[in-house]
Image: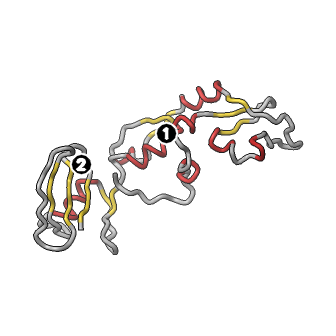
Amino acid sequence: MCIDAVDEEDDLDHNSYVESDEDMAMSDECPEGHMICSPCRGDLPEEKCTFGYSVRCTAGNLARSLSVEHAVESILVDCHYAENGCTENTAYYYHVKHRLMCPHAPCECPEPGCDLAGKRGELLDHLTAVAGHHKWPSTTFQYWVPFDLRIVEPGTHVLRCKNDGQLFLVS
């Protein structure tokens, strides 16, 4: 997974404490029709509706709203990295999780002071190629297949997984 810089106005903070994607799709409603997503319900005093525009809602108890949940599940969002080649359309409540795991997200060089941000293949070349910036040694491996890793000289060594292209740094 590549690390993506997150803007302050992004919605990652809101979704970061949600236990599962299904929690994000769940919605509650008071008898007056005020809506709230289930993860935010615990922030309400006594988990009761406190909304209202000109007058505070006194309807109180919240109940799950299946119609709103179905509506939210039908909202599909293009990936944030569509311009990098991602063609995924994910449910609205899942788009943040996808964004964090998207293989088309730009990868940033982990070396302090190095400002490269590019695709995973570009990062691999940047870290390991003879013409690359860092020229770190690398080893390709497969998950669940034993392999020898011989580190001859001190420094950083790049491991590239053949299964999914993930990069790991060993130092």
**Dot 1 alpha-carbon crowd within 10 angstroms: few under 14, some 14 to 19, many 20 or more:** some
Residue 51: x percent and y percent? 80, 42
**Seen in the image, is 114 located left or right of residue 29?**
left
Give me the residue at 53% from left, 34% from top: 22
Judge by depth and name the residue closer to the eye, 58 or 77.
58
What SS does tag 2 mark? Answer: loop
**Dot 2 alpha-carbon crowd within 10 angstroms: few under 14, some 14 to 19, many 20 or more:** some
What SS does tag 1 mark? Answer: helix
Give me the residue at 85% from left, 39% from top: 57
Q: Identity of the amino acid at label 1?
A: Tyr
* Residue, disc 2: 165
Q: Quadrant of residue 79?
A: top left
Q: In the current view of this chain or complex, which residue is farthest to the right?
A: 55
Q: Which mark is residue 94?
A: 1
**Seen in the image, is 141 located left or right of residue 90?**
left
Q: How many marks?
A: 2
Residue 153: x percent and y percent? 13, 73
Give me the residue at 82% from left, 41% from top: 52
Instruction: Quote the CA–CA distance across marks 2 and 1.
Output: 23 Å
Q: Identity of the amino acid at label 2?
A: Gly
Considering the image in quadrants, where does the C terminus appear? Answer: bottom left
Give me the residue at 69% from left, 33% from top: 28
Judge by depth and name the residue closer to the eye, 125 or 166.
166
The colour scheme used here is secondary structure
Mark toward the start of the polypeptide (2 vs 1): 1
Residue 75: x percent and y percent? 54, 32
Judge by depth and name the residue closer to the eye, 122 or 60.
60
Residue 42: x percent and y percent? 68, 45
Q: Are marks 2 and 1 in contact (CB under 8 Å)?
A: no
Q: Quadrant of residue 30?
A: top right
In the picture shown, does residue 116 fall above or below 119? below
